Amino acid sequence: MKRQVIKFITKQLAVLAPEFKARLLYKKAFGKPLNLQAPSTWNEKINHLKLNGYSHNALVKQCADKYAVRQYIKDQGCEEILNELYFACDSVNDIPWDALPDKFVIKGNHGSGYNLICQNKKLLNIKSAKKLIDGWMKDDYWKTYVELNYKGIQKKIIGEKYIESANGHGPEDYKIYCFRGVPYCTLLCVGRDTGSPKYYFFDKDFKFLCYSDDCLALSQEEIDAFVKPEGYDELFDYASRLSAPFEFVRVDFYISKGRIIFGELTFTPSAGLDTDILPPTDVLLGEMLTLQQH
C-alpha cells in the first residue's frame, strides 16, 4: 500500500510540477543538478526538449503515438516499411484473440515498454494477457519520466505481425540518431529476446563507435565479428526522410530477412536519463543537437 501511495505521489508531481520532477530524476541519475538554462550535454538537451520543445508540438505528438505514426509514415511515401497491422482497438475486451495467428505482438500506443510478444498462442494465458494490457490502458505513461510528448495521446491497443530474423530469434533493432533530417549514427540493440539486451553504436559505414558502457566489455575480436547487414545503407535514406521536420528524432527500424521494417519514432531517448552512454558521448551528442528557441 505504501509503495502504491509513493508511486501515485511521484506521478502526480509530473502534473503539478513537471520541471521539478524532471530535475529530481536527473539528480538521482547523474548526481548533479540539471542545467535547463544553458543545456549543453545530450541528456540536458533531451530534458529541455521533453519539457519545452516537444511538449506542445502536434506533429511530435502524432508521431510519438505508435498507432497515429502510421499515417505519418504513409504521408512521407514510406508505407512499404510499415509492419502488418492486425487490429487497433480501445478496449482489452475488443481484442480479436481468435483471429490472431500463432505468433503476434500486442502493443500500447501511448508510451514505452507496453509490449506483449506471443510466439505460441497455444501457450498464451489470455486472462493474464488481458490483465497486463488493461494495466497499460490505466497507466498514464508520460507521468513516469515527464515525457510530455506522450501526454494526451488517445490510448489504443494495437496488434502487429511478429517479426522474425533469419536465426528464428527476434530481429536486431537499428536505431538511427537524426538531427534535422541528417542521420548521424546507429544504436544497434542485440539480444533483446534474452532479457539482457546489449547496445552498440556504429557510424553510417558500420564502423564500431565506443560510445556506450557495453562497448567497454568487448574484445577487438568481438568487435570485428559484427557484420554490416543487408539493407543497412537504405536505412539512412528512410531515416533522413522521416526525421526532416524535427530538431532530433531517433528513427527505429528492424531488418528481417533483408526487409526493412519501421519500428517507431523516439523523440526523448531514455527520457534524458541515459546513464549507459559514456560521458564523452553525452558531450558529443549534445554538440550535435542544436536547440531552437521555444
Image (cartoon, rainbow, N blue to C red):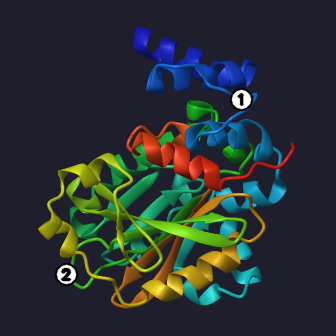
Q: CA distance from mark 2 to mark 1?
A: 45 Å
Which label number is shown at residue 134?
A: none
Camera sees residue 1: no
In the rendered structure, are the residues bearing label 2 and label 1 in contact, judged by CB atoms less than 8 Å apart? Answer: no
Q: Residue at x 62, y 65 (%)?
A: 178
Label 1 sits on a secondary structure element that is: loop
Graded by Cα atoms within 10 Å as few (under 14), some (14 to 19) or many (20 or more), the crowding at tag 2 reads: few
Task: Give the vertical position of 29 relative to 287 (above or below).
Answer: above
Residue, disc 2: 167
On screen, residue 154 versus residue 204, left or right, reads: right
Residue, disc 1: 36
Q: Residue furthest right?
A: 293
Callout 1, which amino acid?
Answer: Leu
Task: Give the vertical position of 118 relative to 128 (above or below).
Answer: below
Q: Which quadrant of the structure image shows residue 206?
A: bottom left
Q: Which quadrant of the structure image shows residue 60?
A: bottom right
